[in-house]
Image (tube, coloured by chain):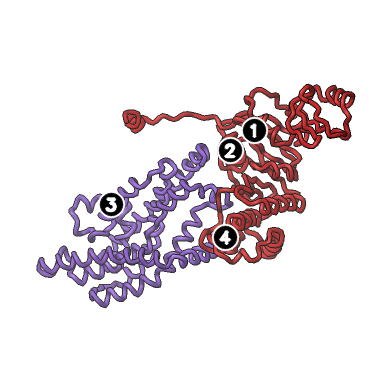
Chain colours: A purple, B red
Amino acid sequence: MTALLDIYRAHFKTTIASQLQYRAALVIWLIGMVLEPLIYLVVWTTVARSSGGQVGGYTPQDFAAYFIVFMLVNHATFTWIMWEYEYRIRQGTFSAMLLRPIHPIHSDIADNLSYKLLTLSVMLPTAIALSLAFRPAFHLVPWAVLAFIPALVLAFLVRFLMEWALALAAFWTTRVNAINQMYFVALLFLSGQIAPLSLLPAPIQAIGTALPFRWMVAFPVELLLGRLQPEEALIGFAAQVIWLIVALALVHVIWRAGVRRYSAVGS
Amino acid sequence: MLAALHSLVRRRFQAVTAVAGISFEVMPGEVVGFLGPNGAGKTTTLKMLSGLLHPTSGEVSVLGYTPWKREKAFLRQITLVMGQRNQLIWDIPAIDSFELNRAIYRIPPAEYRRTLDELTDLLELGPLLRKPVRNLSLGERMKCEIAAALLHRPRVLFLDEPTIGLDVTMQRRIRSFIAEYNRRYQATVLLTSHYMADVEALCRRVIVIHQGSLLYDGDLNTLTQRFSTHKTIMVQLKEERTADLRAYGEVVAYNDGQVTLRVPKSETASITERLLADLPIADLTVEDPPIEEVIEHVFAQPANGMEATP
């Protein structure tokens, strides 16, 4: 355990040092992370105003709160592992990872977390600035705020493992962009990214609930904003745990098959 | 166009046998060179030995482990250096990548410092360690790559073209380093290289792979004897005479009374005798052809043409 912590600490150092080499790229990427929810926020605020002050239980201030929190949760849970894997396998750097006496997922988790820590220093001030500009209304409920923390951790784990499993598609095809595009479209609608799920047509809501997307992002957001009843929160946690188990199993199975394929074909 | 469409609908896969029937054993502390033209199967063999490739059939045992199971205890004792691949993180100084390896390989701090000092000394890494890797020259980067690969003091080293693209001085430096590492730690080294100088300097034993099968396994010197069909006779004539030596063998070079003849190996003795009897000779030497020439000759033949006995 201490050895693993040592490895994570070493990864933190290298990732942060690497990221700081690309400050400009980092800022551009972050602008994108901020701009997207900002656009949805402006659109939905306008819609709410023009339809008599609210849409489906969301006032402009509620939308502001939703998209600001969504931005933070999305930032905390997102990964870029699919592009990473395609690159690794095409460039052959994956071989070096395979020869290390540690599962490569650890370095990916460590890299992801260190990047998040680094960029939090920009995301938090941005969230505060947006709050000053859009005056969000937060209806915080103490138990829900507390429950938000495990919900966020589970959301991160489910999303990370799901996207890691998806990234392993690169073992079978050298063109994973098509798969990624499909995934991002699903994420856009089903994770609550484009609009709160309760505003979407019932069939789409049902699909969102049945699939892991909602539990990877929207659920912690709704929880923190006090939009869920305790029993809804419990269902949410149950869904997260089930998807976590599924994701772990997927990673395990796909990883084994993928490595077998990689080592059969070579690089 | 039609063919392209066809391949879109129905992909055909062709099984290609990369290596077949290669059997050999390497003793601890040995330095063995793999020789073979491009595509002979050298890298494939090294990848199988290090656990990156899973052979369709056959057995491999390294240090008592089956490589492709990639057990941690196995991975901690080996290293694979590929001249064209890198494990160092591009944007940060090599020392930070080293530090990461220290954590991953769980090298105790004191041992890490000692090894790092030794490697820094042997490879003259001092000023390089704190520069971002992307700012290093190819040779400097290779030295750092090798150091990173050896921090955990592996017992078995797989080196795939470790000197590729380096200038002669740097090649020599890396060569002497590998020899020193082998001597100091009794490490086993399997090495491929296109540079015969690497092999001649480091390996007493060579394994020749050609078209995926084993052609020769044994002493580097014996390789020359076994595969060279010709010998070189150098004759220094006593006086400036223009003797016609074409009757004795193929004249490779002729200047200032010094003649170089290429003769069939079996006739070397008789031709030498005739030369000494017929001509006023000041000096005569018989030599094996240079190793490159022998290897070239070996590779020019079909793979199944020769018996593979050590």
Q: CA distance from mark 2 to mark 1?
A: 11 Å
- Label 2: state its secondary structure: helix
| Closer to the eye: label 4 or 3 | 4
Q: Which chain is mark 3 on?
A: A
| Closer to the eye: label 1 or 3 | 1
Circle number at residue A185 = 3
User: How far across and how far down the image is residue A109, in percent?
Assistant: 46, 58
Q: Is residue B28 visible?
A: no
Going from N to C along the chain, the mark reached first, 1 or 4, is 4
Q: Is residue B173 visible?
A: yes
Mark 2 sits on what residue?
B44
Q: How many marks?
A: 4
Q: Which chain is mark 1 on?
A: B
Type of the residue with mark 1: Ile
Mark 1 sits on what residue?
B209
Q: Which one is in front, B167 or A173?
A: B167
Which residue is depicted at the point 35% across and 58% down?
A: A237
Q: CA distance from mark 1 to mark 4?
A: 34 Å
Q: Which one is in front, A92 or A97?
A: A92
User: How far across and how far down the image is residue B138, in percent?
Assistant: 58, 55
Type of the residue with mark 4: Leu
Q: Is circle 2 on the same chain as circle 4?
A: yes
Q: Which one is in front, A181 or A247?
A: A181
Q: CA distance from mark 1 to mark 3?
A: 51 Å
Q: Mark 1, residues whose alpha carbon is within 10 Å: few (<14), some, or many (≥20)?
A: many
Mark 4 sits on what residue?
B136
Q: Mark 3, residues whose alpha carbon is within 10 Å: few (<14), some, or many (≥20)?
A: few
